[in-house]
Amino acid sequence: MSKIFQLIRGVLFPVTLAWLITGCATTVDDRIQADRERYDAYPADIQANISEGRIEPGYSEDMVRMALGEPDRVGTRITEDTADEVWVYHPPRSRFTVGIGGSTGRRTSSVGIGTGVGVRTGARRGEGKRVIFEEGVVRSVEQTDAE
């Protein structure tokens, strides 16, 4: 097996795979930086809440997306008086870790490189948060103790 193939198989493939898997998730900071101008236009108390991933009634859909990201599920709650949009956020259920290590031998001319990718998945324990919108504005937030 060629050294290049060994490098690709042993190092680059696992690191690239882990990067692709974890690269799909965004953080609050990523979302703020992606729309910095809008964030900077919010009052200081709303900026602080968004930075902490907190939302309150009266927030717009854009504020919620910036604070919490895209919802895991979107539905509609129909009552006698209204039809509200409901965004559901599930608690995180997977964790990914990547490790890279290396060593060299003192008495030999060998070099060792190794990588590892760890994945921990758990069963979904229910909904973590439900955000209820009325005409594009948060009317209520329901938090569960899902984890």
Image (spheres, helix red, strand yellow):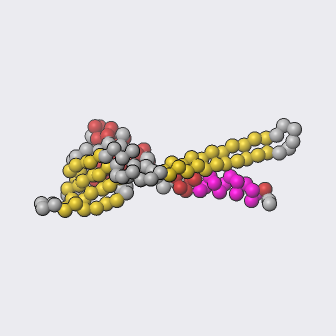
Report the residue at 87% width, 42% height from top. 108
The answer to whether residue 58 is seen in the rendering is: yes
| Image quadrant occupied by the C terminus | top left
Q: Is residue 44 above or below residue 79?
A: above
The stretch of residues the image draws in magenta is 4-17
Q: Is residue 105 left or right of residue 78?
A: right
| Residue 66 counted in the magenta span | no
Q: Position of residue 102 (x, y in %)?
A: 72, 43
Q: Tell whether 23 sits left or right of 81.
A: right
On the image, the x and y values in percent for residue 55 come to 29, 44
Name the residue at 29% across, 37% down: 44
Residue 5 in the magenta stretch? The answer is: yes
Asked whether residue 41 appears in the rendered view, the answer is: no
Q: Residue 13's spot in the image, x, y percent?
A: 65, 57
At a point 35% along the width and 56% down the height, the residue shown is 71
At x 66%, y 45%, the residue is: 100
Residue 58 on image: x %, y %: 21, 47
What secondary structure characterizes most of the magenta part? helix
